[in-house]
Amino acid sequence: RPIRLQRGRPTSRALRGERDRVADSTIARVQELARELGYVADPVAASLRGGRSRMIGVLVHSLTDIVMGHLVTAIDDASQSLGYLSTVVATGGAKDSRDRAIERLLNRRVDGLVLCEPRIGEEVPARLAESRLPYVFAMRPVPSCISITANDRAGGALVAKHFLDAGHEVVAIVPGPKDVRTAVD
């Protein structure tokens, strides 16, 4: 039986698959008709209506770093599993570039930010601190904020133990920049 699509909540609920409020048979019919008509949901309109963009902003220093690549992939996988789209911005490590990226992401109404910048001493950007947007730091501890980090000292100790156990007596370390937490630890 044909359905007449109308603007408004019942059709939207069916398109979103809200099974607690719309019958399964209605959802199936509305979604099939939408596919036949080539309907594509407008996430911008939905974010205006619902106040949520379903986007997570991810700031990284560089996309060429293999650790960042793995981290961004894990963040994207987790975001997708929760119905979010992650958008990644590489800042090159420059404070003004990071601040501009944060401003652009806030203007696009992201629902949260993950700051994957390893530089020591970079405080929470003022614009982000004054916003009500949830954010988390990854790759370096920030005492006043939620931070997710690896235990680089323990990792270094495991590497040293491996070399010592293998009979090596002289080990050199090339840690990287002095203002990057992973290099210092």
Image (cartoon, rainbow, N blue to C red):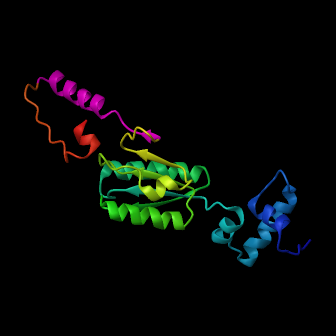
Q: Residue 19 vs residue 161: left or right?
A: right
Outermost residue toward the right in this view: 1
Residue 60: within the magenta? no
Q: Nearer the viewer, residue 86 or 164?
A: 86
Camera-side residue of 121 and 43: 121
Give left or right: position of 175 versus 113.
left
| Quadrant into which the N terminus falls | bottom right
Residue 156 vertical placement versus 130 (above, below): above
Front residue of this view, candidates 91 and 36: 91
Left or right? Give the position of 2 relative to 106.
right
Which residue is at the far left?
A: 170
Residue 93 in percent (x, y) is at 30, 58
Relative image position of residue 39 (x, y in whole percent): 71, 75
Q: Quadrant of residue 163?
A: top left
Q: Reply above or below: 26 against 112.
A: below
* Residue in view at x 11 percent, y 35 percent: 172
Q: Residue at (41%, 45%) from the top-left corner?
A: 138
Count of numbered circles in the view: 0
Residue drawn at 33 percent across, 50 percent down: 122
Counting from the top left corner in percent of width and height, residue 40 is at 68, 73
Q: In screen coordinates, is 165 left or right of 120?
A: left
Q: Is residue 153 magenta?
A: yes
Find the magenta span and give its range. 146-167
Image coords of residue 133 (percent x, y): 55, 54
| Magenta: main secondary structure | helix
Q: Split into 4 quadrants, where in the image is the C terminus?
A: top left
